[in-house]
Image (cartoon, rainbow, N blue to C red):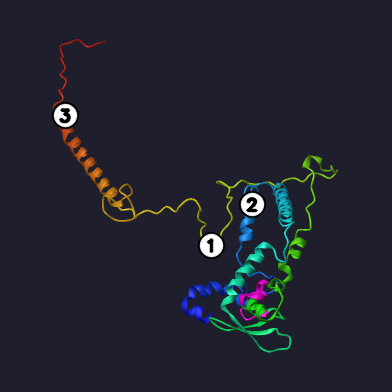
Amino acid sequence: MKRVKVINEQAWQYLEKWSKEAWSKAYFSEDPKNDNICNNACESFNAKIKHERTKPILTLAEEVRRIIMKSMVDNKLKLSTYQGILPPVQQSRLEAMTKLSSRWSPQWCGDDKEELFEVHGWPTNMVVDLGKHTCTCRFWQLTGMACMHAISAIQDKNGKRTEEYCHELLTMEAYKRTYCFNVNPVKGQDLWEKTSSPAPVLLPIKPKPGRPTKKRRKDKGEQPVGSSTNMKWKYNPIRCMYCGEVGHNKRSCAKKKKEDAEKQARQMQLQLALLKGLLPLQMSQTPTMKFNHSLPLLP
């Protein structure tokens, strides 16, 4: 952390807010057997109930129950005829590790149980204990799957398959136990049993101004989600055709608006001056009325 503080103090301040078990691999717990710390599962669930999140609580709960029921059945039937020690996903990960193990050279330490190995390779050597299922890189302890160093040691002295050294939580037996349960069916609301208890009354809801928000609240440091089909709109900097400055166009140019206002003010002053000059001239040209006193007055 001292090195992080020297390189980037803002990053150090951000990491200090969280416990080390949340972001440092050296402090990860070895119980879950999972080295993935992203929230893809939450994002997938949110996308699944996208249209139901705005519905009432009971409607949302019923939809979630149906989603779980369908997911349990699909996963139960998906691998019902599969034969193997590990599920397909874990098997593919193990095969990828097996290919990488060819870059390492194991050396047995000479113990009676043939479990301790020193594995040589780049960038540094690793110590593997096949009995305790541990490796210096901690990949084996965190994921429950033998790492490339452990696989090279297993293939050197041991006649067992590498699948047998994976944790029990990664096997097909654990997969089947996960989906051995079922979600019981529920009758429609119209067929529910009637009770003598009074029906619950909804709380008074005061509508807020504006359109209600449907998107979830995002963290300050969360990156905006891009679209997989639409490209981001990129354009050159806007330059004003009137003053030549960057950042605005001719329509919103403050300099143009100021000069237009001054021009309009000068025109109004000129019109007022012309009106003031013409008014005395018109008054002087207006004929005066003359009274004839010889005419009789009206009664």
Q: Alpha-carbon neighbours of circle 1 within 10 Å: few (<14), some, or many (≥20)?
A: few
Residue 43 covered by magenta stretch = no
Q: Which residue is mark 3?
A: 282
Q: Can residue 24 be seen?
A: no
Q: Image quarter for residue 144? A: bottom right
Residue type, numbered disc 3 = Gln
**Is residue 34 or residue 167 the one in the foreground?**
167
Q: Can residue 267 be seen?
A: yes
**Is residue 205 or residue 112 the one in the foreground?**
112
Q: Alpha-carbon neighbours of circle 3 within 10 Å: few (<14), some, or many (≥20)?
A: few
The span shown in magenta is 134-148
Direction from residue 286 to residue 122 in the image, left or right: right
Question: Which residue is painted at 61% across and 53% down in the image?
Answer: 47
In whole angstroms, how far apart are the C-alphas of marks 2 and 1?
21 Å
Dot 1 falls on a residue whose secondary structure is loop
**Is residue 208 or residue 92 the one in the foreground?**
92
